[in-house]
Structure formats: C-alpha cells, structure tokens
Image (cartoon, rainbow, N blue to C red):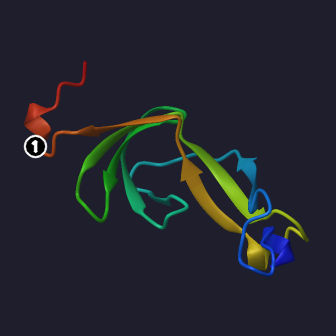
Amino acid sequence: MEEYNIDRNGVSTGASFRYVEQKRCIGQGELLRDFDGTGYRVLECYSQGNMLLLNQETGKLLAAVGVKFYDRYPYVGASLEKNRETGIKWEKAVDLNPVPSRIDFK
C-alpha cells in the first residue's frame, strides 16, 4: 500500500502514480487505450498527436488534440515492467456526430 501512497485506512496520502512520457509513432488502424481501459481505434492521423479516433465501446467518433503516450508506475518503488501500465492522455477532445456525413470538420 505504501508503494501506491495509501495509508492503512485506505486513504490516499498523495499522488498514487507517476507518469513517464513516451515518444511513439502512431499508425492508422492502431488500437490505443486510455488509463480507464477504454480502447480507441485510430481512423486518421492529421499530425503528431492530433487524430480522429473511434471509441471501441460506444462507437462514437472523437477528434483528439495533443495525444501523448505515458507509462504509469506506482508513485513509490521500483519502475519495473510488471508494475507498468501504458496508456494515452490528450489535451482536448471533441465528440463528433456519429453520422460521418454530418460532421463539420471545419
């Protein structure tokens, strides 16, 4: 519990995780996951970190800006492969109309 900054009563005593940004090239069709476990299929890459994603659970389209990859480790302790989680975060995201012909890309 100390490794995740949680006291004996289950109360957080500070940050539970630390994040290490990873540089990675993204390809069309690739499946990405956020730290909640939601999968996003890359439909188009407009530039590094800006892309059109398809939420695999809901089927909604999402325009994501500033997408970055991170490895997440417990706040305290060794950074080992067995305790590493990899996921994405973005600066801004906009849900788009589920009917592609009704999307105003401007």
Residue 29 appears in which quarter of the rendering? bottom left
- Residue sitting nearer the eye, 16 or 28: 16
x, y percent for residue 17? 74, 60
> Going 64% across and 62% down the picture, which residue do you hit?
86
> Going 41% across and 48% down the picture, which residue do you hit?
28
> Going 76% across and 57% down the picture, which residue do you hit?
15
Q: Is residue 97 above or below residue 82?
A: above
Figure disc tally: 1
> Going 80% across and 63% down the picture, which residue do you hit?
13
- Quadrant into which the C terminus falls: top left
Instruction: Specify the farthest residue to the top.
Output: 106
Residue 6 appears in which quarter of the rendering? bottom right
- Quadrant into which the N terminus falls: bottom right
- Residue sitting nearer the eye, 87 or 17: 17
In the displayed structure image, the side of residue 96 where residue 73 appears, left or right: right
Mark 1, secondary structure of its residue: loop
Q: Is residue 40 above or below residue 94?
A: below
- Residue sitting nearer the eye, 105 or 93: 93
Which amino acid type corresponds to the residue marked 1 in the rendered image?
Answer: Val
Dot 1 alpha-carbon crowd within 10 angstroms: few under 14, some 14 to 19, many 20 or more: few
Residue 55 appears in which quarter of the rendering? bottom left
Residue holding disc 1 = 99
x, y percent for residue 56? 31, 63
x, y percent for residue 21? 72, 47
Q: Is residue 73 above or below residue 64?
A: below
x, y percent for residue 5? 81, 67
